[in-house]
Image (cartoon, helix red, strand yellow):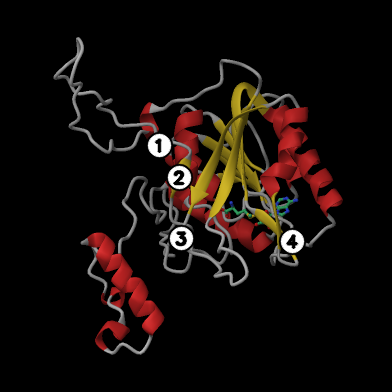
Amino acid sequence: MKIQPHTTGRKVFAHYCDEAEAVVFPGGCLDLLRQIPDKSAQLVVTSPPYNIGKAYERKLDMGTYIRQQAEVITECVRTLTNSGSICWQVGNYVNNGAIIPLDTLLYPIFHNLGLVMRNRIIWHFEHGLHCSRRYSGRYETIMWFTRDTKDFVFNLDPVRVPQKYPGKKHFKGPKAGQYSCNPLGKNPGDVWDIPNVKSNHVEKTEHPCQFPVELVERLVLSMTHEKDLVVDPFLGVGSSIAAAVRHGRRGAGAEIVSSYAGIARKRIEAAMSDSLPVRPMGKPKYDPLIAGNKLTVAPWIIAPQNDAQLKLLQKMADYKA
Ligand SMILES: C[S@@+](CC[C@H](N)C(=O)[O-])C[C@H]1O[C@@H](n2cnc3c(N)ncnc32)[C@H](O)[C@@H]1O
């Protein structure tokens, strides 16, 4: 990841203040959240530790983990504006091969605080561990909650995606002959296919589980307006605030590991000067076949030593025919 030096003169603060465009608090999230006034965050977006023993976390018994999450979520709800949103992105807790989807355990916390779920977004990606005793995990979820109000912010136009059949027309009725789809594009739906940040992703840092910036950009653009405050209690290397400042929003986040907080500050500064390397929103996924990648040609087609793979490929060829 190459980051150009910060040139804009815009500053990343280490403590919350209303004037700050960006805050990276190097410490525990509760200490940052307590600095943020009631009803001031338009969007809280985060990916908390999953309690699976990553380098940055201590594995806790499940009851303690849920209690700690409840404490942070309660503080986040206090900071939320009346029209604001909370997006909590989680995967599975895995113990001795048994998986527990964390959203099922965390949902009651939000519900008991009076919040309403608006979407449970499936984030699908293609790279990760290859499992041998279950299907490999290739999705995580984003739980989107708002207060129990009709007035929550949701702007669809900035996040519309291309229609599948843009040339389709009404074939009968008063609109016959007119184009039937919205020319601005369609609703992206609640299954998002966005590459995760693995080794050759342009945004990769030393953090083991970064948000792709484009994932947060979609949330920021649809759930906030310019100058609104975006809060991330578990900031990691700052992807959420980088996404916020790229679109003229303000951001504040906490990160307990000082090296990650340092990277977050640098990435946010780079985002402020528009020099942060990011995968652009809407860029089509890399398709090795279309790209003509030589590795897509299986060597056993030329020298068929692996009969099982050959049969699979023949089956695929039959479908294509
Ligand atoms: C899943 S990662 C988030 C990664 C982030 N979405 C990004 O794009 O870089 C969770 C982060 O929370 C941090 N963390 C854990 N407990 C924390 C706490 N109490 N306060 C603040 N940060 C914490 C961890 O060090 C880790 O970097």
Q: Is residue 189 left or right of residue 235?
A: left
Q: How many discs mark residues in the rendered view?
A: 4
Question: Counting other residues with Cα less than 10 Å from the Cα at mark 1, is it few (<14), some (14-19), or many (20 or more)?
Answer: some
Mark with earlier residue (4, 1)? 4
Q: CA distance from mark 1 to mark 2?
A: 7 Å
Q: Secondary structure at mark 1?
A: loop
The disc placed on residue 126 is 3
Q: Is residue 144 above or below residue 91?
A: above
Residue at position x 42%, y 63% from top? 201
Residue visible at 74% across and 61% down in the picture: 57
Cα separation, mark 1 vs mark 3, equals 19 Å
The numbered disc on residue 188 is: 1
Ligand 1 is within 8 Å of the C-beta of the residue at disc 4: yes
Q: Quadrant of the N terminus?
A: bottom left
> Mark 4: few, some, or many residues within 10 Å (few <14, many ≥20)?
few
Kindly report the distance in space between the C-alpha atoms of the residues bearing marks 4 and 2: 27 Å
Contact, mark 4 vs mark 1 (Cβ under 8 Å)? no
Front-lying residue, 319 or 153: 319
What's the mark number on residue 57? 4
Secondary structure type for disc 4: loop
Q: Nearer the viewer, residue 122 or 1?
A: 122
Residue 125 in the image: state x and y as whole percent. 47, 56
Q: Which residue is mark 2?
A: 192
Three-letter residue code for mark 2: Trp
